[in-house]
Amino acid sequence: MSKKIAILTSGGDCAGLNAVIRAITHRAHKLGWEAIGLENGTAGILEDPPRVRALKPGDFGGTLMRQGGTILGTTNSKNPFQYEMPNGEIKDRSDEIIAAFKALEIDAIIGIGGDGSFAILNKLAEQGGLNLVGIPKTIDNDLDMTDFSVGFDTAVAVATEALDRLQPTAASHDRVMLLEVMGRDAGHIALTAGIAGGVDIILIPEIPYNVESIAKKIAAVKESGRNFALVIVSEAVKTPGGEKLEVVYHGGEKRYGGIAEYLGPKVAEATGFETRVTVLGHVQRGGSPTYNDRLLASAFGVKAVELVNEGKFGRMVAWQDHNVVDVPIEDAIKRCRTVGPDDMLMHTARSLGISFGDE
Ligand code: F6P
């Protein structure tokens, strides 16, 4: 009987997940492993019957790798250690999940996730003696020890395209456009898309800023003879006074949001320019993956199965210096990889005259 690999996607979705699932399925079948998909992260396995499906290379039919989302579904709010039951009670269901993995005779799990998902999956694996390999995915690109995670490149491409679309309308109306992008506590999307999209100002959570500096930069732009300016701001940027802005959803769930709306009128007042705000939101997570995300997804999927086949567990595949390597999962989630002061792209941006609102 062939051995079984279970695949699950966990945490927020992003473009490229189906390409990862496809790559795992292909490599698994080549190496004589059976691949099954667990639906809805670890939550689906708790259902009766558990939500699992067989995966075969033929299922992908040349189309799924091009599609955003995840055919397996995902969740970023069902922590098995603090699971909210229908009656509102919070319960530790980790033992039930481990028992369900064992009942399904799963020999290895490939989890496609970010830092939060890996912290949970790693804990489950240690507690239940499960064989886990991780594949990094997050538009935030904040996992440590990998240059890139699946989904980041597509998010940056979407943000760059948004700037390309904002520029002509900004120029037509003599306006300052503020674009708010995702990224949680890391400013990678704003920094990368800001450079690629030719902005004047990048605001990221890693660098304190003030409105006077923003106004000074926009005044310089005006003096140079240009009638518009572009500003990209990362969602976790605080107010100049240090207040964290969040949106509270039904049930009390909080997400970053609101900084561009907060700053828009302040920038208008300080510069005399009309300003408008665009919040890109989940558009950054959807749509067809870029070629880079498809390549990363394919290389990661293949390598993850090879690790399973070699019996190397507790590892995360990672992209380092144009090579796929593997690192301990626990090391990759020790810290959130934010934009460092010595980041090469910081130097690039400053050299191009882009302001971070700090001088
Ligand atoms: O971590 C990915 C991410 O898209 C963040 O950039 C963002 O802050 C968050 O997830 C949004 O979460 P949700 O999909 O729950 O609104």
Image: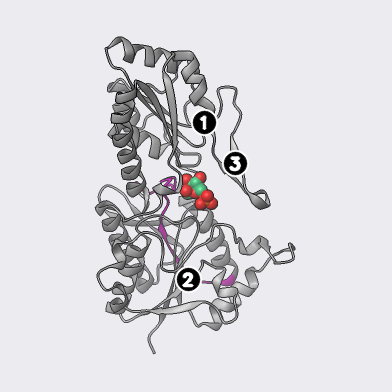
Which corner quadrant of the image does residue 163 belong to?
A: top left
Q: Left or right? Give the position of 33 relative to 237.
A: left
Range covered by the magenta-colored residues: 128-147
Q: Who's the residue at 31% across and 44% down the image?
A: 157
Q: Kindly identify which residue carries mark 2.
A: 131
Mark 2 lies on a secondary structure that is loop
Circle 3/circle 2 CB separation < 8 Å: no
Magenta part mainly helix, strand or loop? loop
Residue in the foreground of this view, choosing between 303 and 91: 91
Snapshot colouring: one colour
Disc 1 or 3, which lies upstream in sequence? Answer: 3
How far apart are labels 1 and 2 at the CA level? Answer: 46 Å
Q: Kindly identify which residue carries mark 3.
A: 247
Image: 27 above or below 173: below
Mark 3 lies on a secondary structure that is strand
Circle nearer the viewer, 1 or 2: 1
Q: Amino acid at mark 2?
A: Asn
User: Residue 89 location, x and y as percent?
Assistant: 75, 63
Circle nearer the viewer, 1 or 3: 1
